[in-house]
Amino acid sequence: MINIETLAKKVGGSIEGDSNLLISGVGDLKSSPKDFLTFLSDNRYYNDLVQSKSEAVIVNHDFPNENIDKTVIRVDNPVYAYIQILELFDTPKKNNTGIHPTAIISSEANIGSNVNIGAYSVIDSNVTIGDSTSIGVSCHIKENCQIADNVIINSNVSIYDSVVIGKNTIIESGTVIGSYGFGLTFHNGENHIIPHKGKVIIEDKVWIGSNCSIDRGTINDTIIGYGTKMDNLIQIAHNVKIGKHCIIAGHSAIAGSTKIGDYVTIAGKVGIIGHLSIGNKCTIASMSQVTKSLKDSSFVSGIPARDHKKNLKLNAHLNKLEKSLSNTKK
């Protein structure tokens, strides 16, 4: 258990109530027991807070603490503070088994200190693995890869040759990084596969979900920028360059040679065609199909994707037209 005063210092918050309260975990408003810390970031859930069994809550500075018999931590951003505290109670676990005897490691690999390598994993020649990195069961790291310190690679991940992975990156199970992209040329009645000689470069603090596929570049590299977070089942094609701190939700696909700026949010099941430029701080709504480049801070939706407000107006007009035509037929 952790004293709530310690937690408040961790997030730079101020306490109102019992500063000696002991916290054993974190949870949501509805299900947390009394010794759990919860949070409120939206006043629409005020009634849930009133009924919550939790004796402690994180709120913003403007929240009125009236008729709430709970110890309060006030912060600028309750969600971020909650994440910081959650990490204290739920740090991702590494596979702390050392190097399993069934792992096959080339004599020409360079393995750092405190590295964990799971059963039946294969590490090829000229691979460098940094300190405190963990590689799960049945992974294959091909030749000339560079994996930095404190990386977590979960089971059944395949990393092809010459891939570079930055510090503090997490790669979930089943992901494939560095395979050939879908590049073809038609000649003499046949489709011929174009060789891919570029790399995949994954910068620091990236999170890649399960069963993703990130293709290597043809000549230039495919790059996933610093701090970017990717959900499960995402396809990143050859030569794509993704900026820093982007968020990409599941089932999205980005076609070849497209450039994604910084702080871009791509919702679920989005398709982006190749050779586009998506500006910084753009938002692409779920199930959109992007067929044109986007300027900075664009918010688009629909098929084809267009300005979100214009798309809502268009849909409203189409609904009116449909009703009008229906009435005409009657």
Image (cartoon, rainbow, N blue to C red):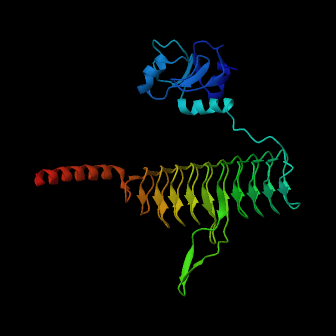
Above-or-below relation of 178 to 46? below
Q: Residue at x 66, y 27 (%)?
A: 10
Viewer-proximal residue among 13 and 250: 250
Q: Residue at x 55, y 21 (%)?
A: 57
> Is any part of residue 77 visible from this angle?
no
* Image coords of residue 237 (percent x, y): 57, 63
Viewer-proximal residue among 127 and 159: 159
Q: Is residue 288 left or right of residue 315?
A: right
- Residue 2 location, quadrant: top right
Q: Is residue 298 left or right of residue 53?
A: left
Which residue is the extreme one toward the right? 107
* Image coords of residue 241 (percent x, y): 58, 61
Above-or-below relation of 208 to 238? above
Q: Is residue 207 left or right of residue 150?
A: left
Q: Residue at x 75, y 41 (%)?
A: 94
Above-or-below relation of 86 to 18? below
* Image coords of residue 261 (percent x, y): 52, 56
Q: Residue at x 89, y 60 (%)?
A: 107
* Image coords of residue 244 (percent x, y): 58, 52
- Residue 288 location, quadrant: bottom left
